[in-house]
Image (tube, grey):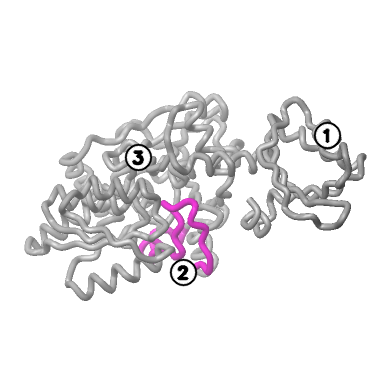
Amino acid sequence: MTDFADAARQSTKRLRELFPRTPLQRNDYLSRRYGAEIWLKREDLSPVRSYKLRGAFTAMRKVRAAKPEQTEFVCASAGNHAQGVAFACKHFGVTGTIFMPVTTPQQKIDKTRAFGGDWVRIVLTGDYFDKTLGAAQAFCTEKGAHFLSPFDDEDVIEGQASVAVEMLDQLGQAPDLVILPVGGGGLASGVTRYLRSEAPQTEFRFVEPLGGASLTAALAGQGPVTLKKVNSFVDGAAVARLGARTFEALKMVQADEVLLAPEDRICVTMLEMLNIEGIVLEPAGALSIDVLPELADLIAGKTVVCVTSGGNFDFERLPEVKERAQRYSGVKKYFILRMPQRPGALREFLSMLGPDDDIARFEYLKKSARNFGSVLIGIETSRAENFKLLFDQLDEAAFSYRDITNDDILSEFLI
């Protein structure tokens, strides 16, 4: 572990060729809310707005030192690793072919092109990261290029450990708890390996998106497991399979140290940090903050560091984030109302709405019978409790309705 810690410190020094250390900021709002010292390690403020530059630069530097003739690199990434590789390619003056899923937000694609300039070529392929990864590895073998893994690489892990090196230097003491997001496990592996050596008293909690719990699956299966289905909303952490090397670093993690964050709840956290603190986080970047309510009893009176891993958020997604946050918070619901086809029925329904209830959607679907018609209705309100009053009035008036807010199948087709 000492050798790894020494290497991580050396890699951290070399990173200063590219950018100053990212801020470690005490967050007054979160500290007051939880009665703790909450610090944010702002990886969203790196030159590429994520920690991924650390691993990409470190791995590329080491390859170039060992093989100066190696001038072509390949990677697969949902966005943040791609930007780090592109930035590093331009810095070293080498060419890079970057494979990205077709579903990658346009903002991340554009930024990758901007960071790499003429030094990189982008190939969009595959709906999910693992398909993209296979295409990149096949291309790499064919061309004899060097593949830069987004997480399952010892040099990448060493580079990500620089987050922990800076954290200890900036804090001036060992934190009681560090909360880490987990996708493929590169960041979590590097930070835990360093802190277990240099701050053994520090505890950890690991956060995965509910729809991409690859660490949870690996711990249960005692080795990396490929998830059958992945929710790609948290694109920076939606990985179907933990890396083999990262599992070796994380296999001692206890199941109760891993928390799962529902995608819709993450949206609430993103909006909260944006509206209250002015901090722009992508879904993966909000993971460590999102679980603080679950840890309220554990963290009271303690020093806690949340790693905000990225801020590459495409604001074209903001309406979706707001919608998901409202639905999770219970202040927006969709339901199908069986509307009587008689004069005054619509007026009767509208009279049931309270002063804070707004109709966000009203669409006749079809006439289900001669005397009734089905209506899709979306309502926004100020407090979740307002819906009980509305539904009580509908029941009393014998209106037939069905709440489809959390019905994934109906929501997908109708909303």
| Residue 43 disc label | 3
Q: Is residue 11 above or below residue 347?
A: below
What residue is pinned by disc 1? 347
Picture disc at residue 194: none
Q: CA distance from mark 3 to mark 2?
A: 29 Å
Rendered image: mark on residue 223: 2
Where 153 falls versus 358 (above or below)? below
Considering only order in the chain, which callout, 2 or 1, is on the residue closer to the N terminus? 2
Q: In what element is the residue under mark 3?
A: helix
Q: Is residue 313 left or right of residue 386?
A: left
| Label 1 vs 3, first from the N-terminus | 3
Of badges 1 and 2, the one in the foreground is: 1
Q: How many marks?
A: 3
Magenta region, residue range: 226-252
Say which element carries label 1: helix
**Residue flagged by tag 2: what amino acid is it?**
Gly
As measured in the structure, the alpha-carbon distance from the residue carrying label 1 to the one carrying label 3 is: 53 Å
Residue 262 image point, x, y percent:
58, 49
